[in-house]
Image: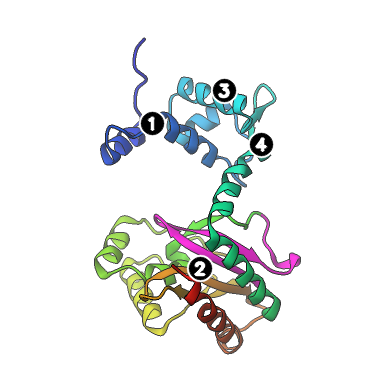
Amino acid sequence: MPRVRRSETDQRLVDEHGPDFSEALARGLRIISAFGAERPMMTLADVARAVDLPRATVRRALHTLDRLGYVRSDGRLFQLTPKVLSLATAYLASNSLSATLQQAVERVAGRLNEACSAAILDGDDIVFIARAGPTRLLGVGVDVGYRIPAYCSSMGRVLLGGLDDGDLAAFLDRIQPEPLTPQTLVDRAALGNAIRRDREQGYSLVDQEAEVGYRSLAVPVKRYDGRIVCALNAGANVDRVAVDRMLETFLPVLRDIAAILEPQMV
């Protein structure tokens, strides 16, 4: 039987991770990750385009995921099933950090009556690992597991500030910043300056760079040796909370909770 042609992405991953890297597992995870708010349901051809794989390869992967209960199909369109949540549940159940941070964001949200989140750096993105707030303020689709680019988010810039200068320079060389809003900072030199400034001042305030009409403030949560473990933020609509009030009201609360968290970080 002829070997399935490797996509450029597959070949790059094998070259990067070595001969023990499982292409089949990587393909399945890429297919699961291809679904989202913008693509909740896809045809076979849609999935193949999204993950840059041959249709035959995608067909076998989808069939396997269907038999395992992670996707379902009406014969034409595929969508994820709730069983996918078990993957996230396994992480949350095995990670005491998530439970600790969930309690922390609930405290912040309760004190400020605004949405609060915690996130970690994962590659060039941040991933939300805890979130809380009034129901009216929690955005649709923005929940635990949600990813956004690190360069345009307050938590991302706080976390990037934890990189040494060499790693930060490599990040800035690697990314291709896109203007998610008219306010998004996309110049690499300016981004580097903003990240270093935020590192020095101990917080990051990002104003409508990731979402029009929304600004957020983030602080680092460090462990005993000063290494940043995660970031904690609170945000609000620009019409409801001015920058001055955010600095005067949000920043002390976030720093207070971060200080309480730090002895628990490992």
Q: Position of residue 51 (x, y in %)?
A: 46, 35
Determine the residue positioned at 31% across, 33% down: 20
| Position of residue 48 measured from the top left corner of the image (x, y, whole percent) | 49, 29
Q: Earlier in the sequence, mark 1 or mark 3?
A: 1
Q: Which residues are magenta?
A: 113-140
First in residue order: circle 1 vs circle 4: 1
Please name the amino acid that badge 4 sits on.
Thr
Give left or right: position of 68 versus 171. Answer: right
Distance (Cα) linking label 3 and label 4: 14 Å
Q: In this view of the protein, can residue 50 be seen by the observer?
A: no
Q: Residue at image x 51%, y 63%?
A: 119
Labels 1 & 4 near each other (Cβ < 8 A): no
Report if residue 29 is visible in the image: yes
Sequence-wise first label, 3 or 2: 3
- Asked if residue 9 is positioned above or below residue 218 in the image, the reply reads above
Q: Which residue is label 3 attached to?
A: 63
Q: Are marks 1 and 3 in contact (CB under 8 Å)?
A: no
User: Of tags 3 and 2, which is closer to the observer?
Assistant: 3
Picture layout, residue 52 above or below residue 143: above
The residue labelled by disc 4 is: 81
- Residue occupied by mark 1: 23
Amino acid type at circle 3 is His
- Which labelled disc corresponds to residue 209? 2
Local secondary structure at mark 4:
loop
